[in-house]
Amino acid sequence: MTKSQVKKIINKILPDLQRALHLDNWKINIEYVEIAPDDLFVGKCHRDEKRQHAVILLCYELLQTKSEVKETLLHELLHIVNAAYDVINDVIDPMLDDTEKNVFNVIRNRASEPAVLALENMLKSMGLNVKDIIALNRRSSIIMMNTMGKI
């Protein structure tokens, strides 16, 4: 897909998906990147839990369909959902030298990816896709407002 095609899809669904995953307070920047042979990825997420800021890198050249764009965005947003675990870094990092930090980061990242994949698989096994997650959040909000007498 082209950069503008991917950007159009992301701009349309990001706000709703962000709300659905309760990431409303997060500032999320999307960067559209070209293929880098030395660092191949479709999506990558860098997050700062303390500042509630994340940057998602999307390699638009590797995304072939609208569905792949949505699924990749959801996957990267699930990494942000897991950002609370980053507090471990604040506790452990000061005790480690640079080599130990690098080893710890590899271990943490290898643990993080299966956790995100498990969340993704759970949603899929429930038959939920990006559209369903957004719709489910809207229904929940309406029910909550109705229960609180705001409708």
Image: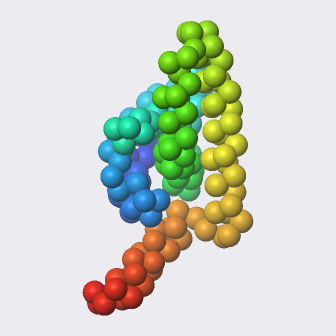
Q: Is residue 117 left or right of residue 59?
A: right
In the rendered view of the protein, which quadrant contains the C terminus?
bottom left
Q: Compared with residue 101, is residue 69 higher up or lower down, i.e. above or below?
A: below
Q: Is residue 146 left or right of residue 104?
A: left
Q: Is residue 61 left or right of residue 146?
A: right
Q: Compared with residue 65, is residue 95 higher up or lower down, i.e. above or below?
A: above
Q: Compared with residue 87, is residue 82 higher up or lower down, i.e. above or below?
A: below
Instruction: Please tell me which residue lies in front, 64 or 20.
Output: 20
Q: Position of residue 19 (x, y in %)?
A: 39, 61
Q: Residue visible at 68% across and 70% down?
A: 126
Q: Position of residue 2 (x, y in %)?
A: 43, 41
Q: Position of residue 68 (x, y in %)?
A: 57, 50
Q: Is residue 137 visible?
A: yes
Q: Residue visible at 38% across and 38% down?
A: 50
Instruction: Please tell me which residue lies in front, 78 or 103.
Output: 103
Q: Residue visible at 66% across and 46% down?
A: 115
Q: How many marks?
A: 0
Q: Residue visible at 57% across and 21% down?
A: 39
Instruction: Please tell me which residue lies in front, 125 or 143.
Output: 143
Q: Position of residue 78 (x, y in %)?
A: 54, 49
Q: Compared with residue 50, is residue 69 higher up or lower down, i.e. above or below?
A: below
Instruction: Please tell me which residue lies in front, 137 or 8.
Output: 137
Identify the image quadrant of residue 113: top right
Coloured how? rainbow
Q: Is residue 73 visible?
A: no
